[in-house]
Amino acid sequence: MKNIKKEEVSIANEILSNAFFDNKSVNYILKRKHDTLLISRLMTYSIKKAQLCGSIWLDDKNNACCILIDPLQPKVKTLYSLWLDVLLILQVVGISNIKKVMHKERVTEQFLPKSLNYIHLWFIGVDIKMQGRGIGYNFLNEIINYYKGKKDAICLETSTLVNLRFYKKLGFEIYHKEDFGFDFYFLIKHL
């Protein structure tokens, strides 16, 4: 497992964009569903935000990627950060979706832990040609082991029902469920 280098950003974007093509939560915020360009722009935004207050990891063979946000890192609202948000609205979400996206963000923020030192697993994906081979399991296990002793928990959300079994196998528990026209699960693993 390694932090991405500047020249690996496109690899991370491609892995995550392809892995999240059919994701209900991702498509919920897009101005056009299943639009590969919009999903790629969303991942570009997410990577740039994580560079400000989190981290981006690749597995050693560049087959899996994750974006993590550290809620304890100061979220400095720089002009650059605000510009990223404006680009997200204009290029990915669209003006007509702002209200529902802000509602989803408020709900998500409401149910993430307030008094716990956790890392937020924002996105995790495996190259679609390599899925089903245990790469995601091993990669997430490396992430879990890396944060043991550094954080009290890992939190994530998913709208992909088939992933619930995967996360539960690694010790994650559902602690809340929301309805956005699809089931949206909040999970936690205490470290």
Image (cartoon, rainbow, N blue to C red):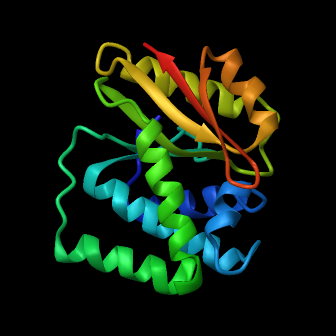
What residue lies at 75% left-to-right and 34% top-to-bottom?
163
Examine the rendered structure and indicate whether residue 167 appears above or below residue 40. Answer: above
x, y percentage for residue 70? 31, 40
Can I make out residue 16 in this image?
yes
What residue lies at 41% left-to-right and 45% top-to-bottom?
109
What residue lies at 68% left-to-right and 64% top-to-bottom?
28
162 vs 61, left or right, is right
Examine the rendered structure and indicate whether residue 101 appears above or below residue 143. Answer: below
Residue 135 found in image quarter: top right
x, y percentage for residue 5? 37, 55
Examine the rendered structure and indicate whether residue 186 appears above or below residue 98. Answer: above
Count of marks placed on residues: 0
x, y percentage for residue 83? 30, 80
Residue 184 found in image quarter: top right
91 vs 116, left or right, is right
132 vs 80, left or right, is right
Residue 166 found in image quarter: top right
Examine the rendered structure and indicate whether residue 87 appears above or below residue 114. Answer: below
What residue lies at 31% left-to-right and 56% top-to-bottom?
51
42 vs 54, left or right, is right
x, y percentage for residue 102? 47, 64
Quarter of the image with the C terminus in it: top left
Q: Nearer the viewer, residue 104 or 50?
A: 104
